[in-house]
Image (cartoon, rainbow, N blue to C red):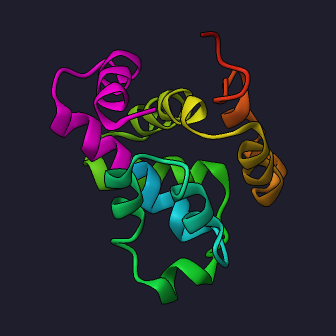
């Protein structure tokens, strides 16, 4: 998926009107995910995304990207909400909606790696997520 298509899909699936809103939600999600993942997992994910999204991941320092801070899905929602200055329910909704945008940008293998890297309580994030290899044409 190219960047313009990502912005279009983001507006549609996130229910927002502007590119900036898509980027704000993207940054909140990717920064939170990057803080949670350890090693080079975030960079591996980012390698499959449009370049501006990899740049968002790389806003987190390499040292911090390696740390792999552990927190539950409920805290993930809270962190996304805090970054966006919205309530937790909205953070949860954006998190799930962003997963629907993220899926078609990555391979089934990368989604599987992400799924097994995260704890079991993250399973709801993966419900009905289509990837580049299983998305309808």
Magenta stretch: includes residue 21: yes
Residue at image position (37%, 31%) is 6
Residue extending furthest toward the bottom = 63
Q: Is residue 57 left or right of residue 117?
A: left
Secondary structure mostly taken by the magenta-highlighted segment of the chain: helix
> Which quadrant holds residue 58?
bottom left
Q: Which residues are magenta?
A: 1-27
User: Is residue 87 depicted above or below 96 in this figure?
Assistant: below
The percent position of residue 43, horizontal first and vertical second, equals 55, 67
Residue extending furthest toward the top = 137
Magenta stretch: includes residue 71: no
Residue at image position (55%, 49%) is 48
Q: Quadrant of the C terminus?
A: top right
User: Is residue 115 depicted above or below 63 in this figure?
Assistant: above
Q: Is residue 72 left or right of residue 86?
A: right
Q: Is residue 124 left or right of residue 29?
A: right
Residue at image position (47%, 34%) is 98
The percent position of residue 83, horizontal first and vertical second, equals 31, 55
> Which quadrant holds residue 100?
top right
The percent position of residue 65, horizontal first and vertical second, equals 53, 78
The percent position of residue 95, horizontal first and vertical second, equals 50, 38
> Which quadrant holds residue 60?
bottom left
Q: Is residue 18 left or right of residue 72?
A: left
User: Is residue 113 depicted above or below 61 in this figure?
Assistant: above
From the viewer's side, name the closer residue of 7 and 48.
Answer: 48
From the viewer's side, name the closer residue of 113 and 16.
Answer: 113
Residue at image position (72%, 48%) is 110
From the viewer's side, name the closer residue of 70 and 45.
Answer: 45
């Amino acid at each position: 998926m190219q960047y313009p298509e990502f912005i279009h899909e983001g507006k549609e699936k996130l229910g927002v009107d502007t590119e900036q809103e898509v980027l704000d939600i993207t940054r909140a999600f990717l920064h939170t995910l990057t803080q949670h993942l350890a090693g080079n997992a975030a960079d591996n994910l980012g390698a499959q995304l449009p370049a501006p999204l990899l740049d968002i991941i790389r806003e987190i320092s390499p040292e911090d990207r390696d740390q792999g801070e552990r927190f539950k899905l409920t805290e993930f929602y809270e962190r996304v909400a805090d970054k966006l200055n919205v309530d937790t329910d909205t953070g949860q909704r954006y998190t799930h909606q962003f997963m629907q945008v993220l899926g078609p940008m990555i391979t089934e293998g990368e989604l599987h790696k992400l799924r097994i890297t995260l704890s079991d309580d993250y399973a709801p994030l993966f419900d009905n997520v289509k990837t580049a290899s299983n998305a309808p044409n």
